[in-house]
Amino acid sequence: MNQLQNNLSIAKFGGTSVATYDAISAAVANVQQQTQRLIVVVSACGGVTDALVKIAHMASDSADSLAQIEQRHQTILSQVSRLRQPRLLYWQTALECIHADLRQHLEERPGETSTRFSQWRDRLLSFGERCSSLLFCAVWEEQTQTMAEVMTAETWLVTDERFGHARPNMDATRTKTAQQLLTLNSDIQYVTQGFIGATEAGLTTTLGRGGSDYSAALLAVATGASEVQIWTDVAGVYSTDPRLCKEAFPIPEMSFDEAAEMATFGAKVLHPASLIPAIEHNIPVFVGHSQFPERGGTRLVKNTVFRPDVLAVAVRKKQTLMTVHSIDMFHASGFLAKLFGIFAKYDISVDLITTSEVSIALTLDEGGSQANNQVTLPSAAIDEIEAFARVELEQDLSLVALIGNQIGRQSQLSQWVFDAVSPTPVRMICQGASAYNLCFLIPSSDTDSVVNRLHERIKR
């Protein structure tokens, strides 16, 4: 076994953790204080990917936006003042080359209707991580006086050709990663990019927004790492959104099942897809504050000792309730297949569903999930449904989810939940498909008060 694989962990730092020179310095100190070997995975500097997304859809006049991105990177590197001149010049030259490559790439922009546009866009979006990984290495060398090197993501993460939402080819990724590990030096700190990979043919792809967490988990699986660390701007996973409830507290340990439910129902510190490789391979995940690691965090494991009835309250705002009424549903077959055939045709993702004899109610996440896959409801889809049913839409709702264990078997749960929710009207209830959640819809205007009342019950 390569020496680098001994006691290896994967540490991912998000956009806020690499947004400035001071933030990167704190991340470097965090890594330096750890005793095990780490491969670092970084997101783009905070806000850069959003800026690149906007540039991608500018047919012209992107010069100012591009200049602002370049200036952010140059400002960070200009603060690396204690690095020996040969190495500083090396990183300065490397950054200038990446920026020059970015400018050249923009000049090759195809039309948005072109079949090449998605491929071109993925490569454009990759420049944020290319630059942040370089900057992390430069700050590492300044702070530690030891060598760092970029381990380009395209050399180890192999994906399919679904540009924008690429899926990994794990067999090929394991092979590529094993080849990489044979060449790595245990005296060098390696930094790779999250979010991006490459096809078998070497074309750059992206995993979708939030994909840096996913990259870290995939790298952990491919290297046989003992842990994935997700370093962000909060000290772990909280019992509810601290912005809604001042009494929210970090949860020391959660099971993968609980964490997956939290991520699915709005815990923004986690990306749902990032948990899948860890769950499948039983690799623990630690979530902590990159600048204040001493505050602790949340450890996600397969099984926990403490399994409370209700662990947390998750919230997703900007929900739409769609109710479809038709007498044709009564004792009829094929109605749901027809309805969901239309949803599939228009690529509409449905969250919660309840049915009666003559109607079906379902929720759509109009605010976008953590992966930023925002749901829109095309008028053409509504027209097709209204050809055989009556449609009602209710917007400005919030989905509240109680996350816990064996929720459906707790005899007193329903009473205290709805005592806490009262007098707020509940527009929809969904429970039974999972033993880990109880979900309901309420008006958005009542969200804060309901969450605080529910959280008060959890504290007891």
Image (cartoon, rainbow, N blue to C red):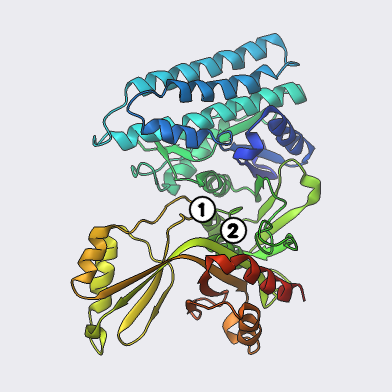
Query: Observer-nearest residue: 39 or 125?
Result: 125
In the image, is residue 276 above or below residue 214? below
In the image, is residue 365 above or below residue 180? below
Q: Residue at x 66, y 45 (%)?
A: 232
* Element class at badge 1: loop
Checking the image for residue 370, the label placed there is 1
The amino acid sitting under disc 2 is Ala
Of callouts 2 and 1, which one flags the residue occurring earlier in the amino acid sequence? 2
The amino acid sitting under disc 1 is Gln
Q: Residue at x 49, y 44 (%)?
A: 174
Please indicate whether residue 56 sits to the left or right of residue 314 in the image: left
Residue 294: x and y, percent?
A: 81, 47
Q: Quadrant of the rendered structure where residue 447 is?
A: bottom right
Residue 122: x and y, percent?
A: 39, 35
Q: Residues within 10 Å of mark 2 (few under 14, many from 20)?
A: many
Checking the image for residue 267, the label placed there is 2
Q: Residues within 10 Å of mark 1 (few under 14, many from 20)?
A: many
Residue 345 appears anywhere in the view: no
Please indicate whether residue 383 sits to the left or right of residue 324 in the image: left
Residue 109: x and y, percent?
A: 32, 26
Checking the image for residue 379, the label placed there is none
Q: CA distance from mark 2 to mark 1?
A: 8 Å
The outermost residue toward the right is 294
